[in-house]
Image (cartoon, rainbow, N blue to C red):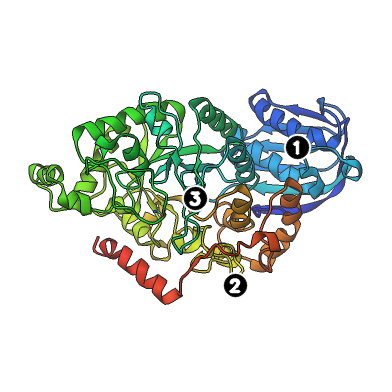
């Protein structure tokens, strides 16, 4: 009962016994995977795995397979043959799932101690998509480094390979930039936070940031688990925290606070050369910390009121011969596309970057439904399907009033499981090859703790993992069976997932009102949001 479902999974005769004397042998190219597996298994066996080979050995070997593919055979011995370290890692993850759920505990504990007997098994497996992502919004509510590392382990358990870290927004700047210390001295802290959607404030300061050493640790920890951390520095909207730190970045010339309320704010960057230079200097440091080939520069929800009122913005539009503020936004993003391309990286932007003409090498993260994905793929751009209506895990999980801070339309576990990464309009079209994969999102305006992240992300993230890893086609009954075996693993790790019948009493949040949306109103909102995309 493996999650996500492998390509092929069969029972075989024989069995394997894992105990404190089990040897582990690995090809030298897979020594890091072996070290990771040793670390994961040592607590449950109650001892170190011995250096292999010997009888009843676990072997990690390289074979002629694609890098993320593997074959796992369990008999008297365990053999994982993989195309490369990533494939071996996924094979090892699958092997862990053949053990009892108790094997996911951090320490051998009485009745949970090995030996464990694993029935004979054969698994052949490879991912369907190369981009299997999850966005974590650490800007709206800060998550400690420890919690981010734990979240990376949970992504890796589900064979996801991209952590998109939303590091900056109106409500907080979360990454140390040496050249501009006020970004975190000022921008990482806000006076208070809005609770729910009735405008009430909690009256309690909130903040936090990652030092550059923290970021290096997060990136290295993730790399060892074959997760690429893709940073997002959101521009030119969603920048009030940066403007609070350096008012010269804004349009007003008056001081602003780090924003304490939610929603799409009016305060955006100005379009002066000095502002572009400022963010290129920021990116110099970001690129040094994140080896990711992709860098997200946002581009979403940039309100245009301040640009309309700004003589500098109007002059830019006239000088450049642009049609309007949409094209000005496009021009702004283009400045960074050239910058990133020169440095061998690719810009990822939310689908708004389509609206005034797309930068040549840009990848589109399509979030407002799938229109952006279709338009971008047809114009030859790579696309990540991040459709809010299927993949925004901050949306409510059930219709009941007891859901904690309900927001958005109802997005059940079954809805997420039904998601198909290739939009219907692209099926059978060669442009479908531009769909790199898909990404779910944990936005945290209303999610202020790791416990609440657990509740919103799990088990929907397990359903999402099947949509990007497993072969096309869905089998809900089969998924339910696999999930029944998977939930005890999450429980053993300590994940406070949502139970099928709703929140447990302490998972409700009485007094924190949500914003329930009726589906028609919601559709009207999406139609309005995407009216620009329809004309592309
Ligand atoms: C987004 O949800 N603004 C990308």
Q: Is residue 264 left or right of residue 519?
A: left
Could you tell me which residue is drawn at 56 percent across and 57 percent down? Answer: 467
Disc 1 to disc 2, C-alpha distance? 47 Å
Label 2 neighbourhood size at 10 Å, few (<14), some (14-19), many (20+)? few
Question: Does residue 443 appear to the left or right of 536 in the view shown?
Answer: right
Q: For this view, does 458 lie left or right of residue 536?
A: right
Q: Nearer the viewer, mark 1 or mark 3?
A: 3
Which residue, given by chain and number where applicable, does mark 2 sit on? 400
User: Tag 1, which secondary structure?
Assistant: strand
User: Going from the N terminus, do you reach mark 2 or mark 3 first?
Assistant: 3
In the rendered structure, which disc, 1 or 2, sits on the residue that comes first in sequence? 1
What residue would you read off at disc 3?
203
The residue that label 1 is drawn on is 79
x then y, percent, for residue 76: 86, 40
Asked if the beta carbon under badge 2 is closer than 8 A to the nearest atom of ligand 1, the reply is no
The part of the image, by quadrant, that contains residue 90 is top right
User: From the viewer's perspective, is residue 280 above or below residue 323?
Assistant: above
| Mark with earlier residue (1, 3) | 1
> Which of 525 and 414 lies nearest the eye of the viewer?
525
User: What is the crowding at mark 1: few (fewer than 14 residues within 10 Å), some, or many (at least 20)?
Assistant: many
């Amino acid at each position: 009962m493996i999650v996500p479902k492998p390509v092929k999974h069969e029972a075989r005769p024989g069995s394997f016994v894992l105990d404190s004397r089990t040897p582990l042998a690995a090809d030298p190219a897979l020594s890091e995977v072996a070290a990771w597996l040793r670390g994961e298994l040592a607590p449950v066996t109650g001892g170190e795995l011995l250096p292999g080979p010997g009888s009843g050995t676990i072997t990690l070997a390289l074979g002629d397979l694609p890098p993320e593919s593997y074959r796992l055979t369990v008999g008297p011995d365990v053999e994982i043959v993989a195309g490369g370290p990533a494939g071996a890692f996924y094979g090892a993850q699958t092997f862990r799932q053949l053990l009892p759920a108790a094997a996911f505990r951090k320490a051998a504990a009485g009745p949970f101690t090995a030996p464990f007997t694993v029935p004979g098994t054969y698994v052949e497996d490879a991912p369907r998509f190369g981009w299997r992502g999850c966005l974590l919004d650490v800007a709206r509510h800060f998550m400690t480094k420890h919690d981010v590392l734990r979240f990376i382990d949970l992504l890796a358990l589900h064979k996801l390979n991209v952590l998109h870290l939303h590091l900056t927004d109106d409500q907080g700047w979360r990454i140390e930039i040496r050249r501009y210390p006020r970004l975190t001295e000022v921008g990482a802290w806000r006076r208070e936070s809005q609770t729910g959607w009735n405008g009430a404030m909690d009256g309690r300061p909130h903040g936090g940031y990652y030092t550059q050493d923290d970021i290096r640790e997060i990136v290295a920890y993730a790399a060892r688990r074959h997760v690429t951390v893709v940073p997002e520095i959101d521009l030119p909207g969603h920048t009030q925290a940066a403007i609070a730190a350096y008012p010269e970045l804004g349009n007003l010339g008056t001081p602003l606070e780090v924003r304490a309320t939610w929603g799409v704010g009016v305060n955006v960057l100005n379009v002066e050369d000095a502002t572009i230079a400022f963010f290129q200097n920021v990116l110099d440091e970001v690129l040094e910390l994140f080896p990711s080939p992709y860098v997200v520069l946002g581009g979403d929800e940039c309100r245009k009121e301040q640009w309309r009122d700004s003589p500098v913005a109007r002059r830019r539009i006239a000088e450049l011969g642009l049609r309007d503020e949409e094209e000005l936004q496009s021009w702004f993003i283009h400045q960074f596309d050239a910058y990133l391309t020169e440095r061998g990286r690719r810009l990822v932007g939310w689908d708004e970057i389509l609206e005034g003409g797309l930068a040549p090498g840009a990848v589109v993260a399509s979030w407002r439904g799938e229109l952006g994905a279709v338009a971008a793929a047809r114009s030859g751009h790579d696309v990540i399907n991040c459709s809010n209506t299927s993949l925004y895990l901050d949306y409510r999980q059930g219709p009941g009033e007891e859901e904690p801070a309900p927001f958005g339309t109802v997005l059940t576990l079954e809805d997420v499981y039904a998601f198909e990464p290739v939009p219907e309009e692209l099926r059978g079209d060669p442009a479908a090859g531009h769909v790199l994969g898909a990404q779910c999102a944990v936005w945290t305006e209303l999610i202020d703790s790791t416990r609440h992240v657990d509740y919103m992300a799990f088990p929907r993230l397990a359903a999402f993992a099947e949509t990007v890893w497993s072969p096309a086609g869905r089998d809900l009954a089969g998924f339910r069976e696999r999930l029944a075996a998977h939930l005890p693993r999450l429980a053993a790790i300590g994940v406070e997932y949502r139970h099928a019948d709703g929140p447990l009493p302490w998972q409700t949040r009485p007094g924190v009102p949500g914003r329930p949306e009726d589906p028609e109103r919601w559709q009207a909102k999406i139609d309005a949001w995407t009216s620009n995309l329809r004309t592309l």
